[in-house]
Image (cartoon, helix red, strand yellow):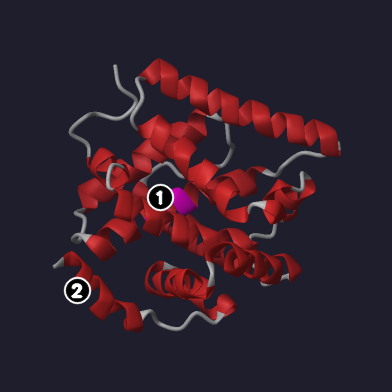
């Protein structure tokens, strides 16, 4: 038995390299603003290799989506174990809202990235994306998860208002992104972020509206 059905839209989304890169780009923006980003700085790995750390998160999600149930559950359990070790080292607990925020990012950017590159998703397809990552959250035993897609939309909007802030970590991460990517690819990253990020994220990072990348995407699709 697979964690995600082979015919699922979720596999189509996460099996498309371009869509996955867009998911990564969006997450890179929102990660920098999260009030719990200091946890990622605690080990020292994030500032040294911010893109690698974000790609590892995306890679784990991709592995889960394309694995059999038992293998997917093992991958999820490994994620929990890694975070427990960090908590032990810091002698503090990562708040459940921080875990929820990451799940919400994966849901939101899965939907937005596919729609930016391919087509609009139906409500049932969006619900399928939601249910997939809800199952991940339930396996991780995260509390306070939404019960359905409609509830997620409300909670997601609330989370954006409450859990995001522009901080010294935000500024530092974007400096690291630029160093790692170079000027041209960094500029492209920010344009993608401006296209798919929620309005509140765009405002905090001063990303603009993303319209400048639309002609580039049209040419790229052709």
Residue 181 position in % (x across, y down)? 53, 64
Residue 146 position in % (x across, y down)? 46, 45
Q: Judge whether 49 appears above or below 8 on screen.
A: below
Decide if residue 159 is in sight here.
Answer: no
Secondary structure beneath disc 2?
A: helix
Indicate the quadrant where residue 36 lies: bottom right
The residue pinned by badge 2 equals 219
Q: Residue at x 77, y 44 (%)?
A: 43
Q: Residue at x 67, y 72 (%)?
A: 166
Q: Magenta residues, as a range?
A: 105-109
Q: Is residue 52 magenta?
A: no
Secondary structure beneath disc 1?
A: helix
Decide if residue 81 is in sight here.
Answer: yes
The residue pinned by badge 1 equals 107
- Quarter of the rendering occupied by the N terminus: top left
Label number found at residue 157:
none
Residue 97 position in % (x across, y down)? 62, 48
Residue 202 position in % (x across, y down)? 50, 76
């Amino acid at each position: 038995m697979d964690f995600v059905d082979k015919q699922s839209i979720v596999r189509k989304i996460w099996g498309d390299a371009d869509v996955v890169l867009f998911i990564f780009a969006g997450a890179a923006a929102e990660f920098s603003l999260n009030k719990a980003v200091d946890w990622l700085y605690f080990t020292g790995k994030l500032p040294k290799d911010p893109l690698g750390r974000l790609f590892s998160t995306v890679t784990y999600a991709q592995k889960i989506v394309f694995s059999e149930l038992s293998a997917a559950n093992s991958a999820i359990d490994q994620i929990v174990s890694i975070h427990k070790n960090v908590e032990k080292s810091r002698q503090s607990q990562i708040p459940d809202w921080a875990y929820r925020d990451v799940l919400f990012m994966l849901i939101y950017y899965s939907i937005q990235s596919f729609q930016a590159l391919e087509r609009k998703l139906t409500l049932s397809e969006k619900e399928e994306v939601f249910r997939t990552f809800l199952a991940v959250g339930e396996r991780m035993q995260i509390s306070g998860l939404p019960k359905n897609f409609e509830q997620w939309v409300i909670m997601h909007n609330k989370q954006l208002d409450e859990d995001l802030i522009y901080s010294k970590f935000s500024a530092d991460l974007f400096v690291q992104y630029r160093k790692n990517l170079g000027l041209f690819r960094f500029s492209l990253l920010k344009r993608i972020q401006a296209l798919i990020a929620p309005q509140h994220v765009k405002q905090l990072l001063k990303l603009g509206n993303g319209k400048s990348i639309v002609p580039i995407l049209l040419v790229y699709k052709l």
